[in-house]
Image: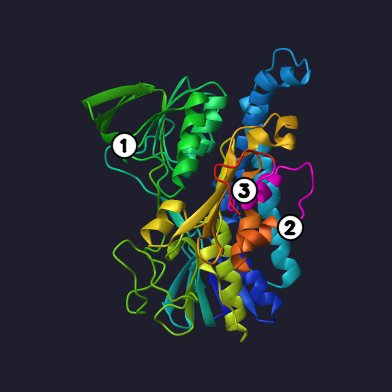
Amino acid sequence: MADKFDVIVIGAGPGGYVAAIRAAQLGLKTACVEKWIGKEGNVVFGGTCLNVGCIPSKALLEASHKFVEAQHDFDDMGIQAGDVSMDVTKMMARKDKIVKNLTGGIAGLFKANGVTGLEGTGKVVSSTQVEVTDKDGNAQSFEADNIVIAAGSVPVEIPPTPLTEGLIVDSTGALEFTETPKRLGVIGAGVIGLELGSVWSRLGSEVTVLEAMDNFLPMVDTAIAKETQKLLKKQGLDIKLNARVTGSETNGEEVTVKYTDANGEQEITFDKLIVCVGRRPYTQDVVADGVGVDLDERGFIFVDDQCRTNVPNVYAIGDCVRGPMLAHKASEEGIMVADIIAGHKAEMNYDAIPSVIYTYPEVAWVGLTEQDAKAKGIEVKTGSFPFAASGRAMANNATEGQAKIIADAETDRVLGMHIIGQHAGEMIAQGVIALEFGSSAEDLALTCYAHPTMSEAVHEAALAVEGHAIHMANRKKRK
């Protein structure tokens, strides 16, 4: 038996590495196990988010958006850029450099905080013991008073479209294209599918998105979802709803996808196909048989509100437990668990977790949608404000979208905030804080916002809840 630790964390993604750092900061002897092999053949930290998820996709989204701006929008501002072109190889190299800097940064944070990095695949073999097997198959056991499982998730594969290297890929493969495909298919109109489809559409691909559901972005407020669909269609994304993929056939460097829709059997041919139908928890072989950690039929680990499993001193956080598969949710759970292990009181407000789709414009929301609130029997009042009426949005050439606030009709408490617009992912933090502190719409309306800013749309939406918006005509006069 090797060294004993107070805490061993399995997984160094945004849940695991944060939990490990926090635990070490609180004086606990901590180790973090990671198996991810980077492009240079070494174990790297950061998990899916830093290596093949949040960060690299945003690097490509930002680069492709700037390319579109230079092509179409600069001229309106008086900037004569001439013909512009995209060097995909250079764009990818920049993306890889960002990833390398951030993953190396975590290694530095581990060293600065005294976290021991253990390279290999971690497995819980008892409530106090973790077995780590390195890439050469050598196993070593470590003892811990507390274990945190932060194993993350992996893309879901579907039988009709088995992955084929370089032709049918998942979200990871879509970040490694060496050139822009002429015809690109995307299966799944969720967050990942829309973001990746947007990247390659901006760079010149003819993008078709096949979505099995008959409603677009059902988790988003209906008004915001409708506007998002309209704007993405305007940008060139052909989004086919109620399109159920039934099979595929590869032929050289092409793939033909068969699907059914309201008109019956259909087929369409692509040069590349991205499968983005969701993610599943990575929990297979993470816990040995006999340990007793309960999993549900989909592979998620059962936990309570403070991420305790049914086995004493064993916790689980992030994508491998219930709740939205979001990096920031995992990080907050990691902090909560580390605090609890250290003997502090801690909890997490699961009603105030923001979500963002990094298309252009961005789509962001927190709390209840209007349709969800009504389904719960809550009488609501809402206020909206279009960016078309915002001076800063006009100056930014970013007048698409709106901010919307949903409040309880009786108490005026903010129940949800929903934004589609430039920098929506930044502005949604105002809604998170409002929910966290139980703010009313009036609290936001009485707050002084800087002018001119995009955030003024939130202020005006709060005023509009009572029909008091200043910079637009109110739909209903209120006292």
Q: Is residue 457 in view from this perspective?
A: yes
Residue placed at 47% from the left, 57% from the top? 380
Magenta segment includes 452: yes
Magenta segment includes 293: no
Q: Position of residue 171 (x, y in %)?
A: 47, 41
Secondary structure under tag 1 reads loop
Q: CA distance from mark 1 to mark 2?
A: 52 Å
Q: According to the image, label 2 marks what residue? A: 447
Q: Position of residue 59 (x, y in %)?
A: 64, 39
Residue 472 quadrant = top right
- Mark 2: few/some/many CA within 10 Å (<14, 14-19, 20+): few
Q: According to the image, label 3 marks what residue? A: 461
Q: Which residues are magenta?
A: 448-470
Residue 44 quadrant = bottom right
Residue placed at 62% from the left, 48% from the top? 461
Q: CA distance from mark 3 to mark 1?
A: 44 Å
Type of secondary structure dominating the magenta stretch = loop
Q: Nearer the viewer, mark 1 or mark 2?
A: 2
State the colouring used for the structure image. Answer: rainbow
Mark number displayed over residue 161: 1
Marks 3 and 2: CB-CB under 8 Å? no
Image side of residue 479 versus residue 326, left or right: right
The amino acid type, in three-letter code, at marker 1 is Thr
Placement of 154 over or under 164, stated as above or below: below
